[in-house]
């Protein structure tokens, strides 16, 4: 757990980076700091590993005031990932990852063996271990950066815009990978980004900061989308928030319709096991497209309805068998029945 209590930071030239920040990043969760350029995100993050010290106020890591700890020792217990990975250019990938375990006194051979395992864990071929960072793509370098931060078994990870320098497709892959790793490892992660979509995708909790270093709102992503506290947060959260909020709402109590089996309209084609294979209208056949899997969110349900040629989506069970039809109106009706708004399982993250 990381606790900021009334933290104020003025740099030597008088720039006030943070006013009086109080927030807690809970154990085992991803807490995202997001906000416009210069709002103090990096300053906040660097106070945890004492790359920056507060002018006043306290930062505690698992209840211990970090100002009482020796910085090098403190940093060995905290993984740190930055933009462009920050890898050591003259060390091989394996040796980059093994750096902290070796500093912690683990034998070199054991540290390298573990580094090889971590490469696989972050989705890289172990054969890249012998290469140097410049011989990797930007996305691969970021994965190595994450592996290196995980290598010391530190319970806390600080991630400062770790995926900003890669293209959107690679970035989405890296985000998926981080969520997958986190579901296995349950680290306490403080993550800085200026991208609200990334914050909403990754955060268990999201802190929106304003320039001048004040906290505008600290809430789970679904709450940020549903109830921004003011115009600044609403503007920052951006367009489509009503639609994006659907990803955090479960579709469990959605009323399903039955499909017509005769008539001139679109008919659903189903195989012998009850699995949908496509649509048919007269002589026309159309591919099935997106279906809504039982347990997914209202966004998935609405998308299935809107992307279907029949104007009605298909809901299937875990085995892919048809459960029923999804009318767009049913999604809106459910959304307005506030008692039905149970969260989707962690959102469609
Ligand atoms: N060493 C420093 N000396 C003086 N001012 C600084 C220093 N480091 C940061 N600042 C200032 O403090 C404020 C907050 O900076 P910080 O880097 O924490 O913001 P940020 O939200 O991470 O910004 P960005 O998204 O652009 O990285 C800015 O006005 C910045 O110019």
Image (cartoon, rainbow, N blue to C red):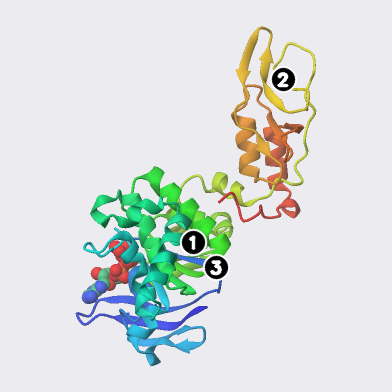
Give the label on residue 29, or none. Answer: 3
Can you name the residue that lies furthest to the bottom here? 68
For marks 3 and 1, the one nearer the N-term is 3
For marks 1 and 2, the one nearer the N-term is 1
For marks 2 and 3, the one nearer the N-term is 3
Residue 107 placed where, x, y %?
A: 39, 76
From this view, report whether residue 105 is shown above or below residue 116.
Answer: below
Residue that label 2 marks: 269
Q: Secondary structure at mark 2?
A: strand
Q: Going 55% across and 74% down the picture, which residue do you hit?
A: 27
Q: Going 49% across and 61% down the picture, which residue do you hit?
A: 230
Residue that label 1 marks: 230
> Along the line of sight, which residue is nearer the eye, 291 or 143?
143
Q: Which quarter of the picture shows residue 26?
A: bottom right
Q: Going 67% across and 19% down the picture, which residue do you hit?
A: 279
User: Is residue 54 among what the camera can see?
Assistant: no
Q: Secondary structure at mark 3?
A: loop
């Amino acid at each position: 757990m990381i606790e900021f209590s009334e933290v104020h930071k003025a740099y030597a030239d008088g720039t006030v980076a943070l006013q009086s920040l109080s927030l807690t990043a809970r154990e085992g969760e991803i807490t995202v700091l997001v906000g416009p350029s210069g709002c103090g995100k990096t300053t906040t993050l660097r106070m945890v590993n004492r790359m920056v010290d507060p002018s006043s106020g306290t930062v505690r890591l698992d209840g211990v005031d970090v100002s009482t700890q020796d910085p090098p020792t403190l940093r060995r217990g905290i993984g740190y990932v930055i933009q462009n990975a920050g890898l050591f250019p003259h060390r091989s990938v394996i040796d980059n990852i093994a750096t902290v375990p070796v500093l912690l006194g683990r034998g070199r051979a054991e540290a390298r063996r573990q580094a090889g395992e971590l490469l696989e864990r972050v989705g890289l071929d172990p054969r890249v271990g012998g290469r140097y960072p410049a011989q990797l793509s930007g996305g691969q370098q970021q994965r190595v950066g994450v592996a290196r931060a995980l290598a010391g078994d530190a319970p806390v990870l600080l991630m400062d815009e770790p995926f900003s320098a890669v293209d959107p497709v690679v970035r989405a892959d890296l985000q998926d990978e981080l969520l997958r790793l986190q579901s296995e490892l349950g680290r306490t992660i403080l993550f800085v980004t200026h991208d609200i979509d990334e914050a909403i995708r990754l955060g268990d909790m999201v802190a929106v900061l304003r320039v001048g270093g004040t906290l505008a709102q600290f809430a789970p992503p679904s709450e940020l989308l549903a109830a921004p506290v003011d115009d600044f947060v609403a503007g920052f959260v951006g367009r489509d928030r009503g639609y994006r909020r659907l990803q955090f709402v479960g579709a469990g109590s959605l009323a399903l319709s039955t499909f017509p089996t005769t008539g001139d309209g679109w008919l659903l084609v189903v195989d012998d096991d009850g699995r949908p294979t496509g649509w048919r209208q007269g002589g026309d056949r159309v591919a099935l497209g997106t279906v809504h899997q039982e347990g997914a969110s209202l966004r998935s349900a609405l998308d299935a309805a809107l992307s279907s040629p029949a104007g009605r989506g298909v809901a299937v069970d875990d085995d892919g068998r048809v459960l029923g039809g999804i009318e767009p109106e049913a999604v809106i009706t459910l959304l307005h029945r506030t008692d039905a708004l149970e969260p989707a399982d962690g959102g469609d993250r």
